[in-house]
Image: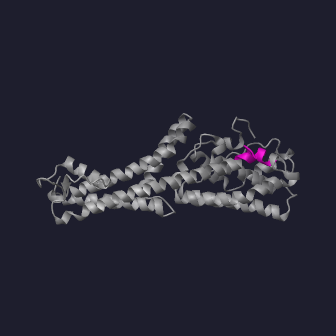
Amino acid sequence: MIGSTLIGVIGTLLILLVVYDAIRTTLSVSSSGPLTNRLDSGLWFMLLGIHQRRKSHTMLSSTGPWITMTLLLTWFLVAWLGWFLLFCSSPQAVVLSSSNATASLVERAYYTGYTLTTLGYGDFVAGNDNWRLPPVLAAANGFFLFTISITYILNIITNVIQKRQTSLTISALGENPRQILASTDGDRKFATLISQLQPLQQSISTLGQQHLAYPILHYYHSESSSKALSLAIARLYQAIAIACFASTRLDLTSREQLLITRKAIEQFLDTLGSAFIHPSQHIPDIPAFNGYADLPGVEASNTEIQDYLASLPYQKILVAFVHKDGWQWQDVWQTENGRGA
C-alpha cells in the first residue's frame, strides 16, 4: 500500500471533497454539499421511518443535534482518511525523526491525526523536502474544519431558537385554526389577528432564508406540537385563508395584511419545495368544519369553507411539510391534548 500513486490520488480527491462539502454547506447560503445532503437526508429518512412505525417524538427531537455531530465527525474522518492515503503514497512522506526509518501504516495514521489536530508532537517528520509542505496544508485543513464547525454549530443554535420562537408566537394565537380565528376576531374583523401579522411576516421570510442557508434546520424536530414550525405554519395558513374567504367585513388594509402574510408563507413553502420536500400528489383531507360558520366574522358555510381550502394548491406542500417533520395532517386541526377542530 505504501508507495502507491493511485492511493495518493484517491486521498487528494477525498480531501478536495470534504473541503468543497464544508464550504458549500456552511458558506454557500443556498444549499448543502453533496456529502452533507446525502448523510443528513439518509439519517432522517431512516429515523422518520422508525417514528412512523412506533411514534416517538422524543427520538426525533434528539435527531437534529446527533445529525449535526455526525456530520462534523464525518468531515474530520474523511479528511483524516484523505491525508492518511496521501501520506501513504510515498515511503519518504513520513519517517521517524530520530532515525529516518520509514513509518508504518499505523504510525502514518497517528502522524495524520496529530497533524490535522495541530498538536505537532514531532516524533515523526517529512522524509524529504518534497513532503514538508503537505503537513502544513494538513494542519491548515484541520484548523479550517474545526473553526468552521464551531461557527456552523453556533449559527444553527441561533436559528433553531428563532424557529421555535416563531412557532410559539403562532401557537399563542391558538392551537388550531378554529382557536386562532375565535381568539382574534376583533369585533368580527380579525383586528387582533391582523395586528400580530406584521412581525410574523418578517419572521417567516427570515426562516425561509435560514432553511435555505442551513438545510440541517429541517431535522431539528420539536417534541411539543406548540413548538413545531410545520404545524404552526399550516394552522396559520388555514386561519388566514378562512378569514380572507369567509369574511366580507374586512377593510382593504386588513385584507392586504392577510394576503401579504399568506404570500410570505407561500414563499416559505416554495423554498422548502425546492430544497427539502416534494409536494404531495393529492390535496390532503380537509375535515368537516363543524362550528366554523358560527365564529364571529365568518360568513360562509362549513361546506363552502371546506371546499375552498381543498382548492388551494399550496395544501399539497403543507401536508408534505407536516409529514416530513414527523407529524400527521390531523395534528393541524387538533390541540395538543387531542381536541379536534
Closer to us: 10 or 301: 10
Question: Which span is picked out in magenta?
Answer: 171-181
75 displayed left or right of 239: left
Closer to us: 8 or 282: 8
Residue 53 quadrant? top right
Closer to us: 82 or 255: 82
Indicate the position of residue 221 as horizontal and vertical percent values.
Answer: 56, 45
Indicate the position of residue 167 as horizontal and vertical percent values.
Answer: 66, 49
Coloring scheme used? one colour
Indicate the position of residue 55 as horizontal and vertical percent values.
Answer: 57, 35
Residue in view at x 58 percent, y 61 percent:
209
76 displayed left or right of 161: left
**Residue 299 in view here:** no
| Quadrant housing the C terminus | top right
Predominant secondary structure, magenta span: helix
Indicate the position of residue 9 as horizontal and vertical percent values.
Answer: 25, 61
**Residue 209 in view here:** yes
